[in-house]
Image: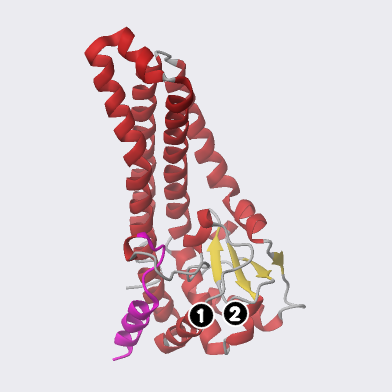
Amino acid sequence: MTLYTNKESNIRKTWLLFTIFLIVVIGLGWIFSRIYGNPGILFFAVGFSILMSFLSYWYSDKIVIGLSKAKPVTRENARELYNVVENLCITAGLPTPKIYLIEDSSPNAFATGRNPQHAVVAVSSGLLGVLDRSELEGVLAHELSHIGNRDMLLSTMVVVLVGFVALLSDIFLRSMFWRGVGSGNRDRGGQAGAVLMLIGLILALLSPLIATLIRLAISRKREFLADASGALLTRYPEGLARALEKIEKYSKPMKYANKAMAHLYIANPFSTKNIAKLFMTHPPIEERVKALRDMSI
């Protein structure tokens, strides 16, 4: 196993997800266009989904950086951080990404960008304050592993899929409530119209939930893979294990974290108490620490 073990797999998964995304959007658009009796809905759904995919691919790093309120750093104003990232990139054979700092006392970090040449790594001031150098190397190696494995491209497409499916479903449900679409459709199409309306209602209710569960499952798997790849990069799994334990002890949510990008962080930026494991964006810290320490045996 190397830093690039999962790169080709993730590229294939990205295209597969993009195909599934278009099929789901076309399917939902077709059903909703039949229910409304308006073929233009299908063309709008397909066109808007392609536009969303384009924007999320080309501008994902700028959007995420803007939402997190991160500021760029240089070698001059963050020498140790810059040196650690640069040294790890040389070892991993990656170009040095742009480095950003989030002014937040909660320790956390994330990586984003469409490819290694346009990648971004951001860390919080709280992370720099609580970790020693070996622990910081572990965290940054984890984030660079996401870059090397092309995880960012995969996660971007998943977010687009989930967000757009939820948007379509929400529009459909709201229109049913405010405009009484169901009764008009039954008058036009009889029993077939009623069945179509029922199918549309079920899809509108279940599609966002199913898409969200898929996103969470992929996100949790990515974290385990990045932990393992990062530990191989530093040759010191204990550094990342200790860093995760310190991050877990700090339970205060990040000030500018956004739920849509929570899966990008190395640890959930929100409180995870009393949240069912099925709906967590990250694997439990204790499981990740155990897996890392098992690598040292």
Pinpoint residue 13: horizontal percent, then vertical percent.
34, 50
Q: Does the CB distance between marks 1 and 2 fall below 8 Å?
A: yes
Q: Dot 1: within a 10 Å radius of its alpha carbon, few (fewer than 14), some, or many (20 or more) residues?
A: many
Q: Which mark is residue 127?
A: 2
Left or right: where 94 falls relative to 227:
right
Quarter of the picture holding the C terminus: bottom left
Q: Position of residue 201 (x, y in %)?
A: 33, 30
Could you give the CA–CA distance between mark 1 and mark 2, rounded to whole angstroms?
Answer: 8 Å
Q: The N terminus appears in which quarter of the rendering?
A: bottom left
Q: Position of residue 65 (x, y in %)?
A: 64, 58
Amino acid, disc 2 = Leu
Left or right placement of residue 123 versus residue 235 in this view:
right
Residue at 28% x, 21% y is 196
The boundaries of the magenta stretch are: 279-297
Q: Residue at x 60, y 56 (%)?
A: 64
Residue 294 among magenta residues: yes
Asked if residue 3 lies in the magenta stretch, the reply is no
Answer left or right for 94 relative to 290: right
Disc 2: CA contacts within 10 A as few (<14), some (14-19) or many (>=20): many
Q: Main secondary structure of the magenta part?
A: helix
Nearer to us in this view, 253 or 19: 253
Q: Would you name the residue on which mark 1 appears?
A: 247
Q: Residue furthest right?
A: 76
Name the element at disc 2. Answer: helix
Q: Amino acid at mark 1?
A: Ile
Where's residue 213, x and y in %? 34, 53
